[in-house]
């Protein structure tokens, strides 16, 4: 995707999928004649990083359930997507299972009673750490974009914080609504 504009709609990534429907990324890439995929890198409980702790209103040192995926386009890495969930929502569910979730996490979250009321996206830039460079096949010292998406219920209770890390050469336009 480097060098080409990739205009992406946020809404499909927030909407639960119908039974048997592909996840939003696979669907979006397919509509463009490409192959979208993902590889699980890590699933389990971790001490929430400070940014995630603040986003999810977790206490100091509190655990979160995480799902870290390497997002692929035509078998090439384009993004690291790290999603975090409060343990009270995710512990003991498929969110804590290393297998792919049919329809994606947003579909399971709906089944668990969590639907998006508000979504906040915060974009920043920085240098990739060595692990990010390895996964994204970047040379050391490469710049990356980081998009933190926090999804909360209509009552303002956050239930998912997703940190997406991608090469800085990407051009992203997010559109919500029609």
Image: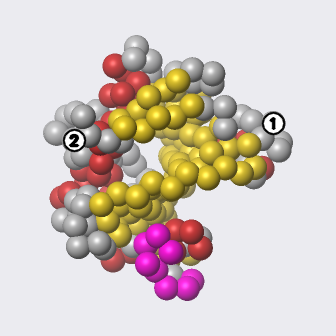
Looking at the magenta stretch, what is its main secondary structure?
A: loop
Neighbor class of circle 2 (other Cα within 10 Å; few <14, some 14-19, many 20+) is: many
Q: Residue at x 35, y 57 (%)?
A: 119
Q: Position of residue 173 (x, y in %)?
A: 47, 35
Residue 35's label in the rendered image is: none
Quarter-of-image position of residue 13: top left
What is the distance, in whole Å, between disc 1 and disc 2 at their CAs?
Answer: 37 Å
Q: Residue at x 83, y 42 (%)?
A: 140
Residue 21 vertical position relative to residue 115 in the rendered view, above or below: above
For the N terminus, the image quarter is top right
Color encoding of the figure: secondary structure
Q: Position of residue 102 (x, y in %)?
A: 28, 43
Residue 114 vertical position relative to residue 87 in the rendered view, above or below: above
Q: Residue at x 18, y 65 (%)?
A: 113
Q: Secondary structure at mark 1?
A: loop
Asked whether the viewer can see residue 85, the reply is yes
Task: Specify the segment rendered in magenta.
Answer: 54-61
Quarter-of-image position of residue 7: top left
**1 or 2: tag closer to the N-terminus:** 2
Asked whether the viewer can see residue 112, the reply is no
Q: Which residue is mark 1?
A: 139
Q: Position of residue 46 (x, y in %)?
A: 54, 71
Q: Residue at x 16, y 39 (%)?
A: 19
In the rendered image, the residue lying farthest to the bottom is 60
Q: Which residue is mark 2?
A: 17
């Amino acid at each position: 995707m480097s060098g080409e504009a990739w205009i992406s709609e946020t809404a499909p990534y927030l909407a639960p999928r119908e039974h048997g429907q592909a996840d939003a990324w696979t669907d979006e890439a397919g509509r463009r004649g490409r192959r979208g995929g993902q590889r699980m890198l890590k699933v389990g409980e971790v001490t929430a990083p400070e940014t995630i702790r603040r986003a999810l209103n977790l206490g100091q040192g509190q655990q979160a359930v995480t799902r870290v995926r390497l997002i692929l386009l035509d078998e090439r890495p384009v993004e690291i997507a790290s999603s975090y969930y409060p343990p009270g929502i995710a512990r003991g569910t498929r969110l804590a299972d290393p297998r792919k979730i049919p329809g994606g996490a947003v579909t399971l979250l709906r089944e668990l009673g969590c639907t998006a009321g508000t979504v906040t996206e915060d974009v920043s830039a920085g240098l990739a750490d060595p692990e990010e460079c390895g996964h994204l096949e970047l040379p050391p010292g490469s710049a990356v974009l980081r998009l933190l998406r926090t999804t909360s219920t209509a009552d303002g209770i956050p239930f998912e914080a997703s940190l997406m890390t991608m090469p800085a050469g990407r051009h992203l336009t997010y559109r919500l609504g029609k």
